[in-house]
Amino acid sequence: MRKDTLRGKIEPQTPPTQHLFEPNAANSLLPSAKELAQLKELDPGVMDWVKGHLDQEQSERHRDHRRRVEILDAQIHREFRLDRLAMLLAFTVISIGMAFSACFVFMQQQVWGTVYAGVTIVAAASVFFRQRRRKIKSIPDDGKDDTT
């Protein structure tokens, strides 16, 4: 037996993640060395021009990435505010329902007060669970495990 099998060689269970942009000969921003040499023969200042354009391209990519992050951050912030507003409104509705239920109980209508309180709680819970289920269904399942 080989040593690596005796030592318990560890192999990843999931394939490595693929990056959106991996520079290689096919998609490199920089021309190949042969093309650069030919361009340098035609124009000796071509390297400065290429470097300038590569710097500009990189700054544009950084700006675009920063803008995407800002958009996602704003979207998360809006969703958080909407969720907080929904919780506040739900608390208000439940509180008003409980107040009406208490009014029924104080008017010697215990059965109606209890039923009204139960219906208020069940309705609020069903709305929350339905909304939660809708959010879970809207998340795309790409088959990737987020725990790793």
Image (cartoon, rainbow, N blue to C red):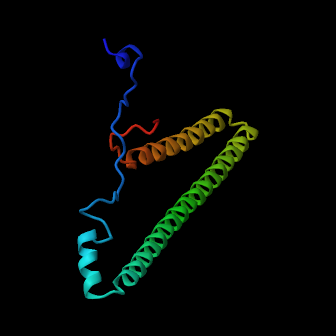
Position of residue 128 relative to residue 21, above or below, is above
Which quadrant of the view contains residue 89? Answer: bottom right
Q: Identify which residue is drawn at 55% across, 40% down.
A: 125
Q: Identify which residue is drawn at 56% across, 44% down.
A: 124
Residue 72 is situated, as x and y percent measured from the top left of the image, at 50, 62
Residue 74 is situated, as x and y percent measured from the top left of the image, at 55, 65
Residue 91 is situated, as x and y percent measured from the top left of the image, at 66, 49
Front residue of this view, candidates 8 and 45 = 45
Position of residue 11 relative to residue 146, above or below, is above
Position of residue 118 relative to residue 66, above or below, is above
Q: Describe residue 123's horizontal placement relative to residue 91 as left or right.
A: left
Q: Describe residue 48's horizontal placement relative to residue 122 as left or right.
A: left
Total marks in image: 0
Which quadrant of the view contains residue 57? Answer: bottom left
Q: Quadrant of the C terminus?
A: top left
Front residue of this view, candidates 1 and 72 = 1
Q: Describe residue 109's horizontal placement relative to residue 53 as left or right.
A: right
